[in-house]
């Protein structure tokens, strides 16, 4: 083996050791950078696609934006209604009318007559 080959073998082993030490020392940081780069690339590509779609179909985008706004307003009103503690239950309508007739019908339902009540009073 010549001196040149021995020197190159030493260099290769030193580079291998350096690579191993770097691989063990920086895996988390390198992974973060890789994920960040992928995220930025995906965001740029998505923005380009969205821009092209917007240029070709402005009416669809406007209608979608209006629809999203209406959904947002409806959800906001629903949350406000829930926060105010709206009562959930059954309601019965009472018709306005003659108060004396209501009293007579209530007394009749209890088994008393209006005449019997007049005798007592």
Image (tube, grey):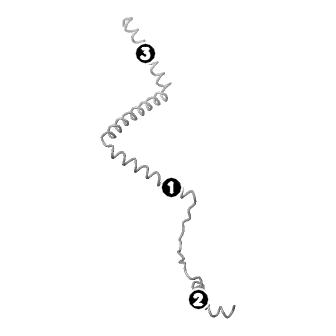
- From the image, which quarter does the N terminus lie in? top left
The residue closer to the viewer here, 117 or 30, is 117
Residue of label 2 = 108
Residue drawn at (44%, 52%), measured in percent from left and top? 71
Which residue corresponds to the image point at 44% horizontal and 20% vertical from the top-left?
A: 19
From the image, state whether disc 3 or disc 2 is nearer to you.
Answer: 2
Say if mark 2 contacts mark 1, CB within 8 Å.
no
Residue ID for mark 1: 77
Front residue of 120 and 97: 97
Q: CA distance from mark 3 to mark 2?
A: 109 Å
**Residue 114 on image: x %, y %:** 61, 91
Front disc: 3 or 1:
1
Give the left or right position of residue 63, taking residue 82 as reference. left
* Up/down of 19 relative to 67, above or below: above
Q: Name the spot of residue 88 as percent of width and height, x first.
A: 54, 66
**Spatial separation of the CA atoms under disc 3 and disc 1:** 69 Å
> Would you call the spot at circle 1 few (<14 residues within 10 Å), some (14-19), or many (20 or more)?
few
**Which of the two labelled residues, at mark 3 and mark 2, occupies the earlier sequence position?**
3
User: Could you say whether the residue bearing mark 3 is in a helix, strand or loop?
Assistant: helix
Q: Residue drawn 48% across and 54% down?
A: 75
Confirm or deny contact between disc 3 and disc 2 (CB under 8 A): no
- Identify the mark nearer the N-term, 3 or 1: 3
Residue under label 3? 13
């Amino acid at each position: 083996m010549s001196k040149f080959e021995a020197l190159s073998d030493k260099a290769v082993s030193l580079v291998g050791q350096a690579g191993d030490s770097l691989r063990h020392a920086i895996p988390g940081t390198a992974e973060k950078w890789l994920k960040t780069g992928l995220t930025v690339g995906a965001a740029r590509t998505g923005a380009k696609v969205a821009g092209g779609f917007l240029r070709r179909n402005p009416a669809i985008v406007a209608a979608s934006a209006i629809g999203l706004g209406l959904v947002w307003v409806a959800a906001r009103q629903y949350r406000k209604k829930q926060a105010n503690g709206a009562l959930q239950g059954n309601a019965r309508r009472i018709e306005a009318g003659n108060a004396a007739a209501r009293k007579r019908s209530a007394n009749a339902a209890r088994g008393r007559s209006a005449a019997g009540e007049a005798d007592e009073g």
